[in-house]
Image (cartoon, rainbow, N blue to C red):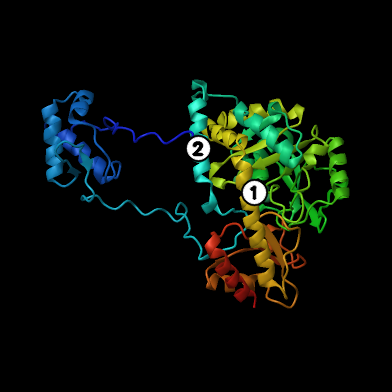
């Protein structure tokens, strides 16, 4: 199909860039031209002006600094002669590709992204190389072409109505969520929703054990105490909630327990909604609910008790964590306090990404992408099972982007596996990292993420895993 919104022709080169220069005279300097030269040299040396950066035209810089155009031109010529700038007849003056600029200071280890592992089987990530760039671009173009000017202003803390409307339709259709746009708050990833909810409505939070340590820390930093809620092959032990008198909220992953992969048993769903109806706050983290491979996904628990359960969703597994786009569907009594907390946290989530996502959902590009991902991840999960067949099997339901592979007694333990994996450049995580408290009694296993790897690299990652477990 022809793209109804063809790319515009390249924009004309801008008339010049904004440039902050300190033109005060330094010690031993005389003359305004010397001050300008000094300021420009300094900006290049310190990396504020990087190679290739365009300088304003001499006419514009002269107007802005109050210097004569001749003075600016003379300063540019001097710096070009010194090798800082490069100027060609008829084109803009730019910072030269190689000057005496010292290399930028190395980034501290904390800020440097770790080198990507040779083989990546870490859980929690989709294959971001499959991001639907073309569809996202089309959605963005359509969204911006029709957006009112007010879209660029401050907006509703709950997010754009276009996205909340699209989400209400999508979540009802795909996940059985009872969603009204008025009760949806768009967040910076689902993690922000979790933090806001805890701040507003919880002081002691029951969290699945094992579960995501990052989320436990988020809950603590939002001011609540965390208590463990055991899990088994039927998911979280929600039948124990009534006995956890101190907990006023619970965070659960009913569709696909993270990290064991269990789905919440119907009797446990009942126990959960009864507890919610008795005043407990249920936070349903539906982080990978779209990905079920063996049957139709079970609908969200929220659909059974929309006045008592908060539903959290995210684009982090479907499109990519970089978007930082998540949402919560709230019971009526929490809409105002959570909206208020969101306003005081960051006013609202960026509107332009929201508009693009609304467009992508509306024209079903989101559905098409999720369907393609579902096929891909299903194949990868099958491949994992085939590759390990005989000695190991993925536990839990066929769903999501990860599987628990239990390590039976007598075989390699988690430390052995980690050590061997490190030797062959294989990144993976062990179940041991997800328990609230370490204990020799904790079952042992690997949490194999089959999403993160690039498509072509996945078979080699599985070979590496098989070698490590051999
Ligand atoms: C259990 C669980 N919930 C939610 C998320 C998504 O979080 P966010 O939307 O903040 O990226 C993740 C991501 O790894 C996760 O593992």
170 or 317, nearer to the observer: 170
Looking at the image, residue 157 lies above or below residue 276: above
Question: Which x, y percent locates residue 216?
Answer: 68, 48
174 or 110, nearer to the observer: 174
Residue neighbourhood size for the residue with mark 2, other residues' Cα within 10 Å, grouped as few (<14), some (14–19), many (≥20):
many
Task: Tell me: is circle 2 under 8 Å from ligand 1.
Answer: no
Question: Which of the numbered marks, if any, corresponds to residue 371?
Answer: 1
Query: Could you tell me if the residues under marks 2 and 1 are in contact, i.e. CB atoms within 8 Å?
Result: no
**Count of labels shown?**
2
246 lies left or right of 99: right
Helix or strand or loop: what does disc 1 sit on? helix
Looking at the image, residue 290 lies above or below residue 333: below
Q: In which quarter of the image is residue 455?
A: bottom right
- Residue at 45% x, 56% y is 109
Name the residue carrying label 2. 138
Helix or strand or loop: what does disc 2 sit on? helix
**On the rendered image, what quadrant is the C terminus found in?**
bottom right
């Amino acid at each position: 199909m022809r793209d109804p919104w063809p790319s515009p022709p390249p924009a004309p080169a801008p008339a010049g860039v904004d440039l902050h220069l300190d033109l005060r005279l330094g010690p031993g300097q005389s003359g305004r031209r010397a001050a300008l030269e000094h300021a420009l040299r300094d900006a290049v040396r310190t990396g504020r002006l990087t190679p290739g950066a365009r300088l304003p035209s001499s006419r514009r810089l002269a107007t802005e600094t109050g210097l004569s155009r001749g003075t600016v031109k003379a300063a540019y010529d001097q710096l070009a002669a010194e090798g800082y700038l490069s100027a060609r007849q008829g084109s803009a003056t730019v910072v030269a590709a190689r000057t005496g600029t010292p290399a930028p200071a190395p980034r501290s280890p904390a800020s440097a992204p770790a080198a990507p592992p040779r083989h990546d089987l870490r859980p929690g990530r989709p294959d971001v190389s499959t991001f639907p760039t073309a569809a996202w671009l089309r959605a963005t173009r359509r969204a911006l072409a029709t957006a009112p000017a007010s879209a660029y202003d401050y907006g509703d803390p709950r997010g754009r109505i276009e996205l909340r409307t699209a989400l209400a339709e999508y979540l009802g259709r795909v996940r059985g969520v009872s969603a009204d746009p008025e009760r949806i708050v768009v967040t910076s990833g689902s993690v922000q929703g979790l933090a806001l909810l805890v701040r507003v409505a919880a002081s002691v939070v029951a969290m699945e054990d094992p579960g995501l340590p990052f989320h436990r820390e988020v809950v603590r930093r939002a001011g609540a105490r965390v208590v463990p809620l055991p899990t088994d092959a039927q998911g979280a032990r929600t039948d124990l909630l009534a006995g956890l008198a101190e907990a006023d909220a619970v965070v659960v992953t009913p569709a696909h327990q993270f990290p064991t992969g269990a789905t919440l048993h119907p009797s446990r769903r009942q126990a959960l909604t009864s507890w919610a109806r008795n005043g407990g706050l249920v936070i349903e983290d539906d982080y990978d609910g779209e990905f079920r491979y063996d049957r139709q996904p079970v609908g969200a628990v929220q659909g059974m008790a929309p006045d008592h359960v908060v539903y959290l969703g995210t684009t982090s597994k479907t499109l990519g964590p970089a978007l930082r786009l998540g949402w919560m569907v709230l019971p009526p009594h929490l809409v105002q306090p959570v909206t208020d907390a969101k306003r005081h946290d960051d006013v609202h989530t960026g509107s332009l990404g929201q508009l693009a996502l609304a467009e992508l959902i509306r024209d079903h590009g989101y559905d098409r992408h999720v369907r393609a991902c579902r096929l891909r991840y299903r194949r990868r999960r099958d491949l994992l099972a085939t590759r390990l067949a005989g000695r190991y099997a993925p536990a839990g339901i066929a769903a999501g982007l990860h599987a628990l592979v239990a390590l039976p007694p007598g075989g390699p333990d988690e430390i052995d596996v980690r050590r061997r994996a490190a030797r062959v450049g294989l990144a993976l995580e062990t179940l041991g990292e997800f328990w609230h408290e370490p204990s020799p009694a904790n079952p042992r296993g690997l949490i194999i993420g089959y999403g993160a790897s690039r498509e072509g690299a996945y078979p080699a990652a599985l070979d590496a895993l098989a070698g490590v477990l051999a």
